[in-house]
Image (cartoon, rainbow, N blue to C red):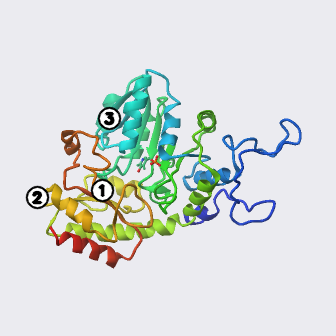
Amino acid sequence: MEFNTKVIHGGQKHDPSTGAVMPPIYQTSTYAQVSPGDHKGYEYSRTGNPTRTALENSLASIENGNYGLAFASGLASIDAIMKLLQPGDEVISTNDLYGGTFRLFSSIFKKFGIKFHFVGMDNIDNIEKCINDKTKIIWVESPTNPMLNIIDIRKCAALSRNKNILLVVDNTFATPYLQKPLDLGADIVMHSATKYLGGHSDVVMGALIVKDKELSEKLYFIQNASGAVCGPMDSFLVLRGIKTLHVRMQRHCENGSAVAHYLKSHPKVGKVYWPGFEEHPNHDIAKSQMKDFGGMLSFSLKGDKYEDAIKILENLKVFTLAESLGGVESLSGHPSSMTHASIPKEEREKIGVIDSLIRLSVGIEAEKDLLADLENALQLV
Ligand SMILES: *Cc1c(COP(=O)(O)O)cnc(C)c1O
């Protein structure tokens, strides 16, 4: 089945009792049993819920995996992966990791004796140098947030293979429309389904997808034992979102490209970070592992003035100033004072998060209105 068919039908059956085309929202915590243990496959909704099952089957299908697991948030799904580890185990990850993931690793799991190495992963040698007998996870995010760095997933898979190391890819920014990490050799794909999968800024959710049965059983055990599951209504919303993922992503990519090129030629703009540009340091890797370049980008201003960035953000009208990304509506953000404010200025600037950096999640509105909105705000500085 092609991807564009999978997003609509993959892993789905019509409801057996009524023929309902969409799975009902099974708003129930428990299920009647005829005799103890004699039930229809569901006992309690932390353990399993049919609406969540429908979503989990869809997730497995669109990522070319065999098993999907849905959680209460992206971070809850990351938390479940980390609970596979033992004290003393080591994790290698990128130095421009999503802020919430960094916080979970460094403020919570470090306490339990897990050691983390945060390195510039776009240089594969930096990863190789950190690998030892205790390495259990290589954690990749690509493209990264907010600098849009690209990490070579195939090369990471070559490093982790045959070594008892799990390769995890946070595929939130790319989505399976652009990039299929399991096909590139990853063991676990992770999503903040809050973003593109849900796609409408109306739900918070996380997801994991794997191929291996034994690994899926370990993660299912943690999902049930720790209990950070998502509810049936949220499952329904994300399932509905996934059905238009391919058409939304196509438009996100078209608009993203238009905005990136417009900004690049603007006299007030400093640098534009978008993997679609040939001069992007990892453009060739992006081309080889992604179908297109997505709707996320960042840019800085000439002169790098904090006040200029704020003025632009206050005056954008179609772009809403807000945290999050991946919804149908365009959003803007200021990493140095919002998502990356907790990182010391010096550290932040080392990875490129300077005061004038603005991040855009380009939505699926008319291109003309998005460009006019940016033009209007940029002429004020
Ligand atoms: C938002 C996000 C997360 C965290 O997901 P939540 O749903 O907010 O818990 C993790 N990784 C990336 C890349 C994200 O954008």
User: For numbered disc 3, what is the local secondary structure?
Assistant: strand
User: For numbered disc 2, what is the local secondary structure?
Assistant: loop
Of residues 379 and 2, which is closer to you in this image? 379
Of residues 24 and 156, which is closer to you in this image? 24
In the displayed image of the protein, which residue is found farthest to the bottom?
368
- Distance of label 2 from label 1 (alpha carbons): 26 Å
- Going 52% across and 42% down the picture, which residue do you hit? 77
Q: Amino acid at mark 1?
A: His
Q: Amino acid at mark 2?
A: Gly
Q: Earlier in the sequence, mark 3 or mark 2?
A: 3
- The answer to whether any part of residue 58 appears in the image is no
In screen coordinates, is 237 left or right of 49? left
Instruction: Identify the mark at residue 283; answer none if there is no mark.
Output: 1
Q: Earlier in the sequence, mark 3 or mark 1?
A: 3
Query: Is 154 placed above or below 36 here?
Result: below
- Distance of label 3 from label 2 (alpha carbons): 30 Å
Q: Looking at the image, do the residues carrying marks 3 and 1 touch, with CB atoms under 8 Å apart?
A: no
Instruction: Identify the mark at residue 303; answer none if there is no mark.
Output: 2
Give the image location of residue 174, x and y in percent: 42, 55
